[in-house]
Amino acid sequence: MDKVFKALADPTRRYLLDQLHAENGQTLGELAERVAMTRQSTTQHLALLEAANLVSTVRRGREKLHYLNPVPLHDIQERWIDKFEHPRLRTLSALKQQAEATMTTNPTNPAKPTYVYVTYIESTPEKVWHALTDAELTAAYWGHANISDWRQGSPWEHRRTDGSGIADVVGEVVESTPPTRLVTTWGYPNAAADSADPSQVTFDIEPYGGIVRLTVTHENLADEKERNDVGSGWPAVLSNLKSLLETGSPLPDKPWLVPSS
């Protein structure tokens, strides 16, 4: 929390967060232009934001893209704001989200949203990869079994564990580089033909000291509603994955089934 407040104390760093909120996934060069600073000075500010977990990065070829990570800000909201003005602020937040969703789906702004989530796991890249691709393990912490041979170009299914054989999500393996990177398309079998354009999920698995940094990037989302939906789903699933790898068992209650307060 101290790192978060220190990072937010500087107006330049707050401005950088505003720019990422307006347009996520920007390069160092793009951000340096927006703050009218040298790349070196911008890099120093971004390093502090990344150390506070307010910004996460994803590599795309030679480019390094920067994304706003809202989790620490949400923690501040829960600790310092919600418990004092919860009902009133929830109403204002709902109005704000509705306005932002309207702007996002406006034909003059066709860019599709992206969701990025970063978590740190006391494990190895090999074990994290295995947990993401093994049918039995995914069934244990996700409630669905991920089925594929995980070769580039192969199909994959996110199949129910009730014996019905129904796949709620299907797609193709776009990239498979064990144990560091997995990219899949993410589509829904019963989606309408005019909304069948699949999204894409990237798992970046990196050694981070003696632990693992797992970055999940969900791109090409249809609109802000879908972004909000995956924004509540991924933290629950990845918390369950983290618990399984660190303790040997998933959380006692499935996070996505616990009603929000």
Image (cartoon, rainbow, N blue to C red):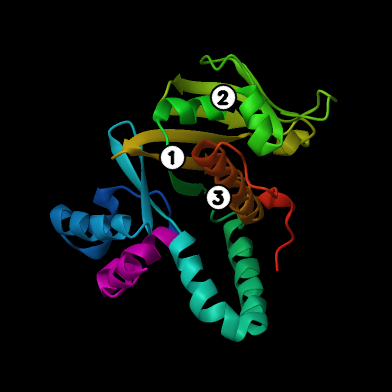
- State the separation of the CA atoms marked 1 and 2: 14 Å
State the residue at coordinates (46%, 72%): 76
122 or 177, which lies in front? Answer: 122
Q: Position of residue 176 (x, y in %)?
A: 47, 20
- Disc 1 element: strand
Q: Which residue is mark 1?
A: 214
Quarter of the view holding residue 171: top right
Which sits earlier in the primary sequence, circle 2 or circle 3? Answer: 3
Whole-percent x and y of residue 218?
53, 42
Q: Quadrant of residue 150?
A: top right
Q: Earlier in the sequence, mark 1 or mark 3?
A: 3
Q: Image quadrant for the N terminus?
A: bottom left
Q: What residue type is disc 3 on? A: Pro
Residue lying farthest to the front in this orientation? 247
Asked if residue 110 can be seen in this view, the reply is yes
Q: Which residue is mark 3?
A: 110
Tell me where residue 145 sits by quadrant: top right
Segment colored magenta: 1-21
Residue at the spot 63% in from the left edge and 46% down from the top edge? 251
152 is higher (above) or lower (below) than 68: above
Q: Which residue is mark 2?
A: 133
- Amino acid at circle 2: Thr
> What residue is drawn where x is 28% and y is 61%?
34
